[in-house]
Image (cartoon, helix red, strand yellow):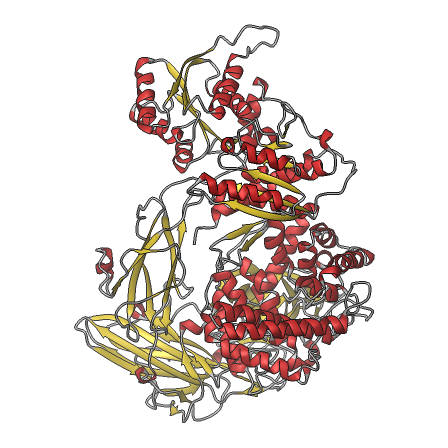
Amino acid sequence: MINKWPFWLVVVVALVGILAYRKSIPSETVESPSPKKIAFVTGGSGDYWQYAVAGAEAAAKERGIELDVRLLETPESLQEQMQVLSALGTTNADAIAVSPLDESSQVSVINSLATLKPVVTFDSDAPQSTRHGHVGTSNFSAGLMAGTLVKTAIPEGGEVVVLMANTTKSNMQERKEGFQTRIAESPNPDESAVDPRFKVIAFLTDDGDSDKCKQLLNGAINDHPDLACVVAMNSRQGPIVASVLKEQDKVGKIKAITFDTPEETLVAVEEGVVFATIAQDPYKYGYEAISMLDQLCRGDENSLPVVGRGAIHVSVEPIKQGDVEEFRKLEIAPLRLLTLALLLGLVPPTAVGGPLRVVHPTCEFAVDPSGVDSRSPRLSWQVESGERGARQTAWQIIVASRPEMLAKGLGDLWDSGKQKGSETLLHRYEGKPLHSSQKVYWKSRSWNADDEPSDWSPEATFTMGVLDGSDWQAEWIVAPWQTESVMMRRSFPVKAGLKRAIAHVCGLGQFEMSLNGKKSGDHLLAPGWTKYNRTCLYETHDITPLLNEGQNAVGIVLGDGMYHTERRNRFSKFQGTFGPQRAIVQIELEYEDGTIDFVVTDDTWRVAPGPITYNDIFGGEDYDARRESHGWDQPGFDDASWAQAVALVRPKGNLRGQTYSAPSIEAIEICEATEVSRDSDARYVLDLGQNASFMPRIVVTGPKGSTVRFTHAEVLDDKGHIDRGTCGGNRGPAYWQYTKATDGQEEWFPKFFYAGCRFLQVDLLPAENGGTLPELDEVEGVVVHSTAAPAGDFATSNELINDIRTLVRWAQRSNMVSVLTDCPHREKLGWLEQYHLNGPGVRYEFDANRIFIKGMQDMADSQLDSGLVPNIAPEYVEFPGTFRAAAEWGCAVILVPWQHYQATGDRKLLADYYKTMQRYLEYLSSIADNGIVSEGLGDWYDLGPADRPGHAQLTPPPVTATAFYFRSAEVMAQIAEVLGKDDDAKEYNELAASIRDAWQREFRNEDGTYATGSQCSNSLALVMGLAAEEDREAALRALVEDVESNGNAMTAGDVGFRYLLQALAEGGRSDVIYTMINQSDRPGYGYQLAHGATSLTEAWDANHHASHNHFMLGHITEWFYKDLIGISPDPSAPGYKKILIRPNPVG
């Protein structure tokens, strides 16, 4: 897809445009009603006119006006345009805004329309029409600007040549007149003489012929050696001027002023070939056209400046010579891009042009992945260009078995050839059959609209996993006894001529693999958590650099993770087991002569207990360094005393690779620890400065056998002691503990336990009573979480808003592991409502596609025979009643793949899990009573009369459960349509309609509000389309009043708050949202920050009974990006193939 950076620039333009307009609006006296509907007609098909539409939509939304957008796609015949315009005479719109492609031929139609209703034209040039108003900066004013720029470029004066396209056209003639007026103005206002410094030696007309234009300019330069400046009045002439100046070696010697911004001109400006270019602002045109019609319909014409005979014209006084210094201030380095909208105070930035660049190649949403277990993996890339409207028109992929073949452009595995199309995402490999463990090299290129090929993308690779079960030669092995942590090893030889070594490995619950004493890879807490009796994820490592010719050794350390947890003397959320710790390893040694040797797990491997004496995903990790077997994972180690491994009989769970895996968990950054309180020499508290998902790295000295313990907490009590009430501390302790092996300095980093915390209570324990205490030389908090790459950035001038975004983002980061957890300490479970309620916000911040892809397999693996998808996936514990069966949670199985499709254009989840989704919807229908589903949790954690949030207080479960039953049916109909299942789509649409009728029948109130009238109830009605059309105004009004009556604060909780934000934003009341979040006095984001939170808390009031690292209330992120900045995918072109940009700044 097109790189998003240029669109960020467009957002800046749009935001500036709206803010500038608001500052310029005069006070209004409303005498007549505003128009209810405006027809907005504009020509062309590129980004330029999309921005005009975006501006019109923004203005209409502010005023509550319905917009009927009609595009005049550049037609083959003028007659087609005339038909479109003539049809406006019968439109039910109250007013018309139109920008015809050829107004001089269409004046009669516009004049006729103007006799029927108010008509405003914009960015058009025929002054003879009887339109009621015109939006745009006149060509005369543009000529004035060109003259001013000449005086800016050559303040000392000089000879000037002006290139005209065709002086018979009114726009060229008007620009010429404006230019002559400005050039002639004397620098001394007291003198009437013309400015003697500037001499226009020629106005040269090329009659639209580019070759003639070049000839004329070359002649002028040759005939006038002192020529100081050239002005190109037509956009087509800009690139010609730049090329001639280069050819004539006149860059910098002759200053060039051009009009409009074709790609080549922008490059020329950046390079300093062109001094400045004058552009237009279509967003402003669209915005002002709607604003003008609104004022006209309300009889407020006097507030608009009048130019000419009856024509209302948005402009200001012509630019004077005194504005030259202001021009200098407004220059945007390294470009000088001045827009016609500068007359209204705008100078938008733009992107630098150039050929298409193909970047960021990925395979199955990953960069150079290993372990791909799809026979036809899908390849994607991004296309960058600074050119407005640039697009890919064709593409080519070549795939090779060796890098040297790829470098030569030889695709021995697949050469797609040049294929027409704009799609850059998810091209399925269609070459020769791939085999297990194969490494593949590929690259792609794109053609632009001029059919010019780009350079090839950077070289990319992917390595296949194990494609067939029969390709596994390894066996699952276990130890013959139970222990806290099993160590497994095997020695093996490597012959001369090793070309490549690869390992497919899985260790359950968690594992680390090492070869010759060195850890393989940077992954932590591997593999990803799954429903292990259904799916076990293996990893594929390239271990070539870790091996040596001769004897080598491989070692595996196993921990419990989510695979096995039990209640003992430490905290545990639940207990359950999938069996004994187990591992499977297949090492493939590929030699230069083409032979392959295998090293696999079997009963020849040796096993032993290790130094990890306790590990539990909830309770912590203890390490006794005295039990280490030095050199155990290196060749030459004597393992005679170790036991033999045992092959596991009938292992459960299908082995799956990268295609089903989330991004790896790794160390991301370091937080330094600072002591904040001390009870004694043996106990003190460290502050890491940030609540995050941590593992500590320590350096410790002291006697052999002495111990250091770290108990984690999120908050402190009034005495400066840790308070573990927010992370389950009332059900037992949880900590890391390290016991020293020597009297010297030792370093330790845990393997299998992480926790969300900010504070660490340090307990120093002597080796024996009364003995010397150990000392901590260093303590670092290592932030660990998913390596899903950051995708978005957001900042405003309001520091509270910035801090809110950071607050939420830390909670998102802390809970992104191989599942989206609720909290990183007390539960660490994949509660599914977060996947769909917060999924869109997470996607704006991170490239989290693979987390959601994995999540779908987790849901499918956890689905019951009844079709129920439980509240958590993977389901490790069966919670009672509704805590297992809430509709607001389980519907994620339908909503997540739809959101994924909208965000990426990827239909695979829709197709692969269609039956899973059908079964869940059938389950909901089976428990519905006359269309009403009661099995739900309501608006979980809303703010009501109780002393603290928890169970829903303001919105009962049937309201929310049935709403999501409706939404599930509605989305299933859309999914069926995408997949071409028309009969299913019809069935689901009918089901959705019946549920909507039931919801209205059960919950509609006489005043047009719904259910309890809570923020959640009315928001769901508005956003989901459950409200009757005639009720929408009353429901929105009640919603706003509810927020205001609560002190401009939210009461909606986990389920309702996202819909509260959407209802207000879609209703044009983002100002209410801003007021709601821009305060710290009432429970909410600012309140949490004011009370010391550094990551989002579970409860709005940040009480110490609930988690302080919980992203479930983080829906504001979606509003920041989608509604405030206004960036979202066009539903008609998923995957951001088309981008909707609708900024709505507030505050």
Q: Residue at x 30, y 27 (%)?
A: 211
Return the x and y of residue 196 as percentages of the image width and height.
Answer: 49, 8
Q: Nearer the viewer, residue 334 or 1022?
A: 1022
Q: In what quadrant of the picture does the N terminus appear?
A: bottom left
Seen in the picture, residue 350 relative to 164 is either above or below; the reply is below
For residue 303, side relative to residue 924 (left or right)? right
Q: Going 63% across and 30% down the picture, which residue do you hit?
A: 314
Outermost residue on the left side: it is: 593
Residue 1094 visible somewhere in the drawing: yes
State left or right for residue 271 relative to residue 110.
left
x and y percent of residue 599 in the render? Answer: 29, 81
Tell me what residue is drawn at x 41 percent, y 28 percent: 274
Q: Considering only vertical position in the picture, is 485 above or below 61?
A: below
Q: Position of residue 463 (x, y in %)?
A: 33, 69
Q: Quadrant of residue 466?
A: bottom left
User: To which quarter of the image does residue 35 belong?
Assistant: top right
Considering the image in quadrants, where does the C terminus appear? top right
Which is nearer the eye, 1145 or 1130?
A: 1130
Q: Count the numbered circles shown.
A: 0
Q: Is residue 572 visible?
A: no
Q: Position of residue 517 (x, y in %)?
A: 36, 73
Q: Residue at x 43, y 81 (%)?
A: 507
